[in-house]
Amino acid sequence: MAIILKSAREIAAMRKAGIIVATVLAEIEIAVRPGITTKAIDEIAERIVSGHDARASFKGLYGFPASICISINEEVVHGIPSPERVLREGDIVSLDFGAIVDEFNADAAVSLPVGAVGEPARRILQCGRTALQRGIAQARDGNRLGDISWAIQSYGEAKGYGIVRQYVGHGIGRKLHEDPQVPNFGPPARSVALRPGMTLAIEPMLNGGTERTTVLADNWTVVTEDRALSVHFEHTIAITEGDPVILTAPE
Ligand code: MG
């Protein structure tokens, strides 16, 4: 496993990409409402990246046909935008977006309520957001990768959620997916020693029921095996000598 440490200049390029990612997700958050199609959301993402001399990281990656992954309710990740797919009041929608600027990637995801949602949806949204914060808080020089993993797993499971095993976070830089893998589960104080210059996409996926997932017939959309709700929150961060820097935070 070769982890590529980034220079300050490279991290600054990733921050540029991260601001585009944050802008796209913020614009979509404003647009998300009952009645919008997932294709219309994809078009918002496409319009913003093309206006910023950026590209969508996912478009064409491994053959993915759109700019953004949009996953609704029991869908975990990798949902494909479609003009036939309409958001409905009470849904939760997960939006996963990456951008490339000056050859560097940034990647983030957020799950949002569509209109008024029920208490189980509100609760899993809140816990998913907190799980990501707990993971990021461990992304410090001197800690180990397992500290991030355990912070997410221990919090999510204490709240009663299944922590997805089959999909994990990742190193990120010139490539969207670099070493190391960043699992959302596993024991603390193990695995890779974290160092300044490491850039990681940390991305917990919490399920309302079983942690197990399955892939639909489109060969992309990942759903919970029991069709319970799922949420996905992600930031790209840089490890420094002090606090972690969230490269996909809004400007
Ligand atoms: Mg990612």
Image: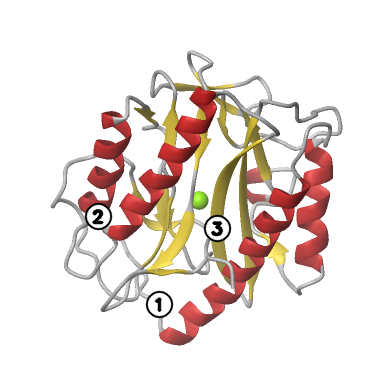
Q: Determine which of the numbered discs, if any, sits on residue 6 in the image.
A: 1
Q: Examine the rendered structure and indicate whether residue 163 appears above or below residue 179.
A: above
Give the position of the C terminus as an image quadrant. Answer: bottom right
State yes or no: Cβ of the residue under disc 3 lies below 8 Å from any atom of ligand 1. yes
Of tags 2 and 1, the one toward the viewer is: 2
Image quadrant of residue 88? top right
Q: Which-is-in-front pick, marks 3 and 1?
A: 3
Question: How far across and down, in percent of the image, does residue 142 sit?
Answer: 16, 68
Counting residues from the start of the chain, the first of labels 2 and 3 encountered is: 3
Amino acid type shown at disc 2:
Leu
Check disc 1 and report its element: helix, strand or loop.
loop
| Rendered residue at 82%/40% (across/down) | 39
Q: Earlier in the sequence, mark 2 or mark 1?
A: 1
The image shows residue 192 at horizontal and vertical percentages of 21, 58
> Residue 167 — which label?
none
Residue 238 against residue 221 in the figure, above or below? below
Rendered position, 105 above or below 154: below
- How crowded pointer 3 is (Cα within 10 Å; few <14, some 14-19, many 20+) is rated as many
Under tag 3, what secondary structure? strand
In the rendered image, residue 206, in percent from the top left (x then y), is placed at 42, 33
How far apart, in angstroms, are the residues tagged by discs 2 and 1? Answer: 17 Å
Q: Which mark is residue 107?
A: 3
Which amino acid is tagged 1?
A: Lys
Residue 145: mark: 2
> Is residue 170 found left or right of 239 in the rendered image?
right
For badge 3, the amino acid type reads Asp
Residue 167 in sight from this viewpoint: no
Total labels drawn:
3
Q: Quadrant of the N terminus?
A: bottom left
